[in-house]
Image: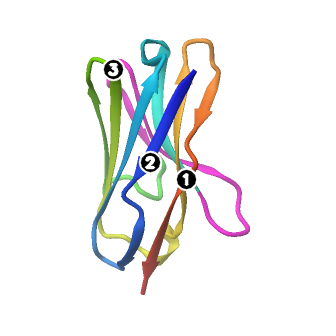
Amino acid sequence: QVQLVESGGGLVQAGESLTLSCAASGSIRSIAAMGWYRQAPGKQRELVAIITSAGGENYADSVKGRSTISRDNAKNTVMVNLQMNSLKPEDTAVYYCNARLDSFMNYWGKGTLVTISS
């Protein structure tokens, strides 16, 4: 079992920056990768960025070049941060933290709303 707690969502203006944080606890040694997904109204959930336990990163084309995902490993928790710059109205969505275990089981956070005003 992995528990995920997200923070950092809110209302920001276009062009500004925002950092989302996700704290993972529980069976963190089994985590193979952690990432952020988002779901805009009327759209399917999509990958934003992912980072593996080895430090490999992957970004959606829509955020590449203006977003950075990072990971900090502590004794009992793993923190994953997503910094997003030059935010656009189309970045508005509910952002979900994801942890994928070595067994390919997935865990999800409850989501945090990000609203970008134009």
Q: Secondary structure at mark 2?
A: strand
Measure how far apart labels 1 and 2 are at the Cα level: 7 Å
**Does label 1 or label 2 sit earlier along the sequence?**
2
Q: Residues within 10 Å of mark 1 (few under 14, many from 20)?
A: many
The location of residue 114, given as percent across then percent down, is 47, 67
**Does label 3 or label 2 sit earlier along the sequence?**
2
Q: Which residue is mark 2?
A: 6
Mark 2 is on which residue type?
Glu
Q: Secondary structure at mark 3?
A: loop
* Image quadrant containing the N terminus: top right
Q: Residue at x 26, y 23 (%)?
A: 74
Q: Residues within 10 Å of mark 3 (few under 14, many from 20)?
A: few
Q: Residue at x 62, y 12 (%)?
A: 103
Mark 1 is on which residue type?
Gly
Q: Which residue is mark 1?
A: 111
Magenta range is 39-59
Residue 118 appears in which quarter of the rendering?
Answer: bottom left
Q: Which residue is mark 3?
A: 76
The location of residue 55, given as percent across then percent down, is 32, 24
Q: Secondary structure at mark 1?
A: loop
Q: Residue at x 55, y 43 (%)?
A: 109
The front one of 46 and 1 is 1
Mark 3 is on which residue type?
Asn
Magenta-span inclusion, residue 42: yes
